[in-house]
């Protein structure tokens, strides 16, 4: 799998590249600013672009804006954003066009190789991955009444873990329940969010998107 990494912090960028290459990925290019990122993504067309939200030249949200451009020009590329802080408003902009192939992790997760590898694989496959800190903040923010209100506390917990990119097995291990019990909760979530089976839509991604927008 080919990856482009963009971060102006050279040590972090080089460290992430080394970890990913040791895990079997092909880091085809690195960039230190948003403009160079766009040039290299357009040239290499990787499966995944790993992007720091705040990058030169503006050091505000240049990485995010580059990600939005990539999303528009090359929608099949998975986008994994890194940030120093929980900034879910940036994530909201990126998710406006859908949750498929989008991830958002805090930078201190880079040293967790298994988590990083799982996140890259998941966004490459069209899934979504959110840092647990981002999910926790979203759970705590005020929400308007909507379909999420019909979920039980356990179903909300399961949906939150789904938003982090966890599989049913991983959710079962986290909650100390059987995988069959998780499957029942997921089925209940789909029903309450009015997400019937469909060959065109990925219900798991749509449920997470409903959760994030809720």
Image (cartoon, grey):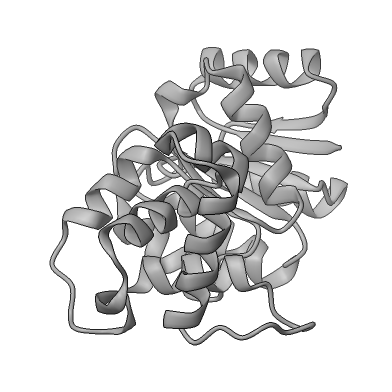
Which residue shows up at 78% across the image and 18% down it?
23
Of residue 25 and residue 198, the one placed in the foreground of this image is: 198
Give x and y (percent) for residue 202: 68, 72
Picture layout, residue 125 above or below residue 198: above
Give x and y (percent) for residue 4: 73, 37
Give x and y (percent) for residue 43: 85, 49
Instruction: Tell me, yes or no, if residue 133 can be seen here.
Output: yes
Give x and y (percent) for residue 37: 65, 44
Question: Left or right: 74 with respect to 84?
Answer: right
Question: Left or right: 8 with respect to 85?
Answer: right
Of residue 14 and residue 197, the one placed in the foreground of this image is: 197
Which residue shows up at 72% across the image and 70% down it?
73
Which residue shows up at 24% across the image and 77% down it?
149
Identify the image quadrant of residue 91: bottom left
Question: Left or right: 33 with respect to 70?
Answer: left
Counting labels gives 0
Quadrant location of the C terminus in the rendered image: bottom left
Which residue shows up at 52% across the image and 75% down it?
190
Picture layout, residue 106 above or below residue 168: above
Identify the image quadrant of residue 200: bottom right
Quadrant location of the N terminus in the rendered image: top right
Q: Residue furthest left?
A: 142
Instruction: Tell me, yes or no, if residue 167 can be seen here.
Output: no
Picture layout, residue 78 above or below residue 23: below
Of residue 54 and residue 101, the one placed in the foreground of this image is: 101
């Amino acid at each position: 799998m080919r990856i482009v990494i963009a971060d102006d912090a050279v040590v972090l960028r080089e460290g992430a590249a080394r970890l990913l290459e040791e895990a079997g990925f092909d880091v085809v290019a690195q960039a230190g600013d948003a403009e160079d990122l766009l040039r290299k993504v357009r040239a290499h067309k990787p499966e995944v672009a790993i992007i720091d939200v705040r990058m030169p030249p503006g050091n505000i949200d240049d990485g995010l804006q580059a990600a939005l451009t990539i999303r528009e020009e090359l929608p099949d590329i998975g986008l994994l954003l890194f940030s120093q802080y929980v900034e879910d408003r940036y994530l909201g902009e990126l998710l406006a066009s859908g949750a498929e192939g989008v991830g958002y992790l805090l930078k201190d997760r880079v040293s967790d190789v298994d988590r990083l590898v799982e996140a890259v694989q998941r966004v490459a496959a069209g899934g979504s991955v959110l840092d647990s800190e981002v999910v926790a903040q979203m759970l705590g923010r005020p929400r308007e009444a909507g379909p999420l209100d019909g979920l039980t506390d356990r179903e909300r917990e399961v949906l939150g873990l789904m938003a982090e990119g966890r599989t049913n097995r991983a959710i079962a291990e986290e909650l100390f329940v059987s995988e069959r019990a998780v499957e029942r909760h997921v089925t209940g979530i789909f029903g309450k969010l009015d997400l019937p089976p469909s060959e065109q839509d990925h219900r798991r991604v749509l449920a997470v998107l409903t959760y994030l927008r809720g």
